[in-house]
Amino acid sequence: MGQDVVDAALEQMECVYARPDTLTDTRFHYCPGCGHSVVHRVIMEVVQEAGIREQTIGVAPVGCSVFAYNYMDVDMQEAAHGRASAVATGIKRVLPDRFVFSYQGDGDLAAIGTAETIHTCNRGENILMVFVNNAIYGMTGGQMAPTTLLGMKTSTSPAGRTVETAGFPLKITEMVAMLPGTYYVTRQSVHTPNAVRQLKKAITKSFQYQKERKGTCFIEVVSNCPSGWKMTPVQSNAWLVENMFPLYPPGDIKAPK
Amino acid sequence: MTADPRGVLTGPHFIDGDHACSEGAIAAGCRFVAGYPITPSTEVVERIALRFPFVGGVFIQMEDEIASSIAIQGAVWGGKKAMTVTSGPGFSLMMEHIGYAAMTEAPCVFVDVQRAGPSTGLPTQPAQGDMMQARWGSHGDYGIIALSPNSPQESFDLTIRAFNLAEQYRTPVLLMLDECVGHMTERVLIPPADRIEITERRLYRGPKDDFLLYKPDEDLVPSMVSAGDGYRIHVTGLTHDERGYPAMTAGAQDKKVRRLVEKIRRNSPDIVDFREEGTEGAEVIVVSYGITSRTAIPAIQMARREGIRVGHLRLVVVWPFPEERIRELARKVTSIVVPELNLGQMSLEVERCSGGAARVVQVGHAGGGVHNPHDIYVAIKKSLR
């Protein structure tokens, strides 16, 4: 079938699903099956649909998603490792009528950035913090993260994570939910289409709450790292359900009544 | 004293500079490492994580470089030889604790596998842009020792020397690799344990009542005890007297800080290490260190083929700087060429020491790769015009 035939057929079809304008045309560089590209897309879909593209400012982290600016076609500032929420605080305080979100992985948000995370939430900054938790340092090649599960093998826990040497997996989302500054704290995932839809709802709500100046919205996305976990994408999603969800169960942790 | 054979993998290995550094640390008796993953230094801690269970060492992956560099300060005062490992942004975060180690005179090793900066820069590419940060990075005055290996073998050898110097002078020692040396894989020969000289801690063994934690010996270095030995020591980053207790006066400050600077300065003849080749009768000298010492060699050969008398001085110990020797050579040559993966750092030191006696030419490179030897060769030729 020639391209002209395809083009003619396409012209007669109604477009029901397209790449949002808020995403650049760049192909995602993430490993096959990685959740980052889905999370990127969902945030940008919400920004597009809410019509807040020119009012939205994102803060990218250090880690795999340091390249977020390659895809998210809104104003972006990369923070030093772990400091995204402090940078977002600075932006939001001087531009209180804009929509500000930070985007961080587990190493960035829950290890080196713990202080900034806790204090941003405690101040109740009117921002959305997106926290992609795949229980590993992906960018540097699969080291143990604060959220790494007990027994999980990584390059810095070669015999599996033990409590004796590395302590317990850090449930930082539950921690920030305890702080009065947070308004909406939820844990989502992107391993099924339905989960993606749920995440989209959570992001939409968060931007609405931000508009109403309710306080910090915090969304953990339990995600995968097929490369770091040394699994196929399908295996990694099954593993996520079996192993990540018991410790990091999806659902709202703190939601307005 | 020689190395504990349980930690020494005697024999030939084909490993990179990062792994050689891990083996050097273990051979030197290091039994505590705290670190945080950061390219291009992560392989050092990965190997430590794998090897430490077999030698009874403690490895902790900390939440960041600030915590890593201060955790080792606790381990040192607990009586262990300790090290932290990082790169670029992590090295910047560690600066306060280099000063803490200098002030408390805690023997420990900081490894910085240099990548291109500033800020996040080029995480996977080489640079030598942290050389002045190594010297002056923490606030206040202090002396410092920094070494610069140019091969995996030297990464092994100099890691051992770093630990030995740290113990001998009760000071933090910085091992300044660059990404090239860290990631280059070559033959590394690990000698038998009884051929590896190890400097043990200068432990005080006298009566408890007489002990002063900061009373210097003749070489300006005080002896040490560990926490838990019953001496009731007090360790602080505040300016302190010989007992180790805060003494907040200009007089105490002068006495303490002057000694911190002097103990390195006065002992520098025993610390400095450089290699010379063809410097006798040379008209131009190339001063280099780390990976740049290897890119300089073809450039020197090119110039020599044209009859130019080129000498090569390679810094193995970068700080303290071999001031005397550079001063001497500057009086004998027309020019000194300094290739480095930054836009002017050690060349400033060469310039200072040559005091105008020789023309100093820096061959700068912002990092992200290494010099094309041809650029160094051109600089050698031009420097003589």
Image (cartoon, rainbow, N blue to C red):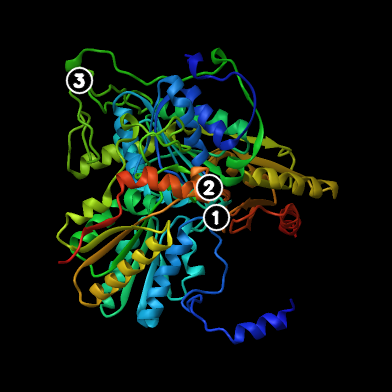
The reply to whether residue B65 is in sight is: no
Q: Which residue is mark 3?
A: B231
Which disc is residue A31 wearing?
A: 1
Q: Rate crowding at label 3 as few (under 14), some (14 to 19) or many (20 or more) other CA atoms within 10 Å.
A: some
Q: Which residue is mark 2?
A: A227
Which disc is residue B36 wearing?
A: none
Q: Position of residue B293 (x, y in %)?
A: 66, 43
Question: Which of the chains bears the disc numbered 3?
Answer: B
Q: Left of A128 or right of it: where is B270? A: right
Q: Left of A54 or right of it: where is A251? A: left
Question: Which of the chains bears the disc numbered 2?
Answer: A
Whether label 1 touches label 3, CB < 8 Å:
no
Residue B180 lies, with reference to residue A157, above or below; the image says below
Q: Rate crowding at label 1 as few (under 14), some (14 to 19) or many (20 or more) other CA atoms within 10 Å.
A: some
**Residue drawn 22% across the image and 21% down it:** B228
- Asked whether the residues under marks 1 and 3 belong to the same chain, the reply is no
Dot in front, 1 or 3:
1
Instruction: In this rendered view, identify the residue nearer to me: A66 or A38.
Output: A38
Instruction: In this rendered view, identify the residue nearer to me: A194 or A165.
Output: A194
Q: CA distance from mark 2 to mark 3?
A: 52 Å
Instruction: Please identify the quarter of the rendering in which residue A193 is found.
Output: bottom left
Whether label 2 touches label 1, CB < 8 Å:
yes
The reply to whether residue A101 is in sight is: yes
Q: CA distance from mark 2 to mark 1?
A: 7 Å
> Which image quarter holds the C terminus of chain B?
bottom right
The amino acid type found where label 2 is placed reads Ser
